[in-house]
C-alpha cells in the first residue's frame, strides 16, 4: 500500500490526545497501520498533545476513557506476535504483509480477524454491510465493482478507510490504504472501480444526508 489520502491533522491530534470518538479512533488506527506518513504525524501530535494536556490539568472522565481506548489500540499495534501487526514504528512495507486474509489489527475486536470469516448483511443491490455490535456507528461495507452509490453529504463527520478494491468520487481515487476524512461540507457520490468489490470501514458521528428518496428510505431501515 502507498496511501495518497491521509488523516486530517486535526484528526491525528484528537487521536493522539485520546479525544477522538471511539468509532473514529478505530478507523484512524486502521489507517495508521498502513500509513508511515500519518504515523510520523502521530508522533508529532503526541508531543503537542502532551503539552496541551499538561496545560489543561487533569482531563475529565470521558477523556480518560478515550485515552485508555487509544492506548489499547496502540498496544495492539505494538504487540510483536500474531494476530497483531508489526509495531507502529516500523515501515509500511513490513506491516501486515504476512497474511492477506487478515483484517487490520484495530478492526479485529469489532469484526474478527479475517476477511473470509465476515458475515455480510444485504443492504441494497450490490451493497452489503456489517455493523460492529459494540460500536453501532462503526460499519464495514462491501460494494460490488462498478457500483454508483447515492449522492450524499454528511451530518457531521465521516471517516472511511479503504481495505480492498477502490472507488472514485469528486475528491479523487481512493485505493487500499487511503482514508477519506470528510466533514459536513463535502457532498460526493462514490463509484467503485471495475474488478473486485470495494471493502471499506466507516465511522459516522451523525447520519448521512441523502438527496434521493430511495436512499432516504434505506437510511431509515439501516440507520446510516
Image (cartoon, rainbow, N blue to C red):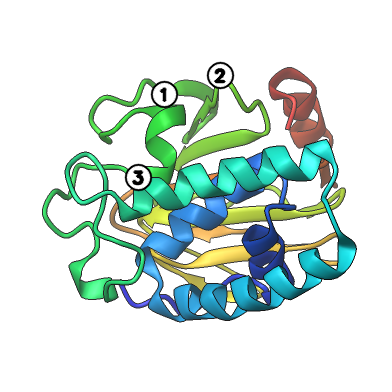
Using a 10 Å C-alpha cutoff, classify the residue at mark 2 as few (fewer than 14 neighbours), some (14 to 19) or many (20 or more).
Answer: few
Which residue corresponds to mark 2? 133
Camera-nearest residue between 143 and 89: 89
Residue at image point 28% right, 49% down: 79
Q: Circle 2 sits in a helix, a strand or a loop, which is it?
A: loop
Where residue 108 sits, quadrant-wise, is top left
View extreme (left): residue? 98
Residue 29 percent across, percent down from the top left:
49, 54
Note whether residue 212 is visible.
no
Residue at image point 27% right, 36% down: 115
Residue at image point 78% right, 54% down: 157
The image quadrant where one finds the C terminus is top right
Picture layout, residue 52 above or below residue 195: below
Using a 10 Å C-alpha cutoff, classify the residue at mark 3 as few (fewer than 14 neighbours), some (14 to 19) or many (20 or more).
Answer: many
Which residue corresponds to mark 1? 120
Picture layout, residue 96 above or below residue 222: below
Camera-nearest residue between 125 and 31: 31
Which residue corresponds to mark 3? 105
Q: Circle 1 sits in a helix, a strand or a loop, which is it?
A: loop
- First along the sequence among labels 3 and 2: 3
- First along the sequence among labels 2 and 1: 1
Q: Between tags 2 and 1, which lies in front?
A: 2
Do labels 3 and 2 touch, CB within 8 Å?
no
Residue 182 percent across, percent down from the top left:
72, 63
Q: How many marks?
A: 3
Q: Circle 3 sits in a helix, a strand or a loop, which is it?
A: helix
Q: Residue 96 carries which label?
A: none
Do labels 2 and 1 touch, CB within 8 Å?
no
How far apart are the alpha carbons under marks 3 and 2? 17 Å
Amino acid at each position: 500500500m502507498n496511501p495518497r489520502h491521509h488523516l486530517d491533522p486535526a484528526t491525528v491530534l484528537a487521536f493522539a490526545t485520546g479525544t477522538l470518538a471511539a468509532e473514529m479512533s478505530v478507523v484512524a488506527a486502521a489507517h495508521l497501520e498502513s500509513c508511515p506518513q500519518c504515523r510520523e504525524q502521530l508522533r508529532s501530535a503526541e508531543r503537542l498533545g502532551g503539552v496541551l494536556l499538561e496545560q489543561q490539568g487533569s482531563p475529565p472522565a470521558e477523556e480518560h476513557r478515550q485515552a485508555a481506548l487509544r492506548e489499547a489500540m496502540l498496544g495492539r499495534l505494538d504487540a510483536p506476535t500474531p494476530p497483531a501487526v508489526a509495531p507502529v514504528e516500523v515501515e509500511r512495507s513490513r506491516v501486515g504483509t504476512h497474511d492477506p486474509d487478515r483484517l487490520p489489527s484495530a478492526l479485529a475486536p469489532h469484526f474478527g480477524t479475517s476477511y473470509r470469516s465476515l458475515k455480510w448483511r444485504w443492504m441494497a443491490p450490490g451493497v452489503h454491510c456489517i455493523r460492529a455490535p459494540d460500536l453501532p456507528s462503526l460499519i464495514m461495507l462491501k460494494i460490488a465493482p462498478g457500483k454508483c452509490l447515492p449522492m450524499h453529504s454528511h451530518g457531521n463527520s465521516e471517516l472511511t478507510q479503504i481495505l480492498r478494491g477502490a472507488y472514485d468520487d469528486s475528491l479523487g481515487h481512493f485505493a487500499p490504504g487511503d482514508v477519506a476524512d470528510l466533514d459536513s461540507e463535502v457532498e460526493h457520490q462514490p463509484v467503485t472501480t471495475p474488478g473486485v468489490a470495494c471493502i471499506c470501514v466507516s465511522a459516522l458521528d451523525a447520519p448521512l444526508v441523502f438527496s434521493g428518496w430511495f436512499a432516504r428510505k434505506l437510511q431509515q431501515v439501516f440507520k446510516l
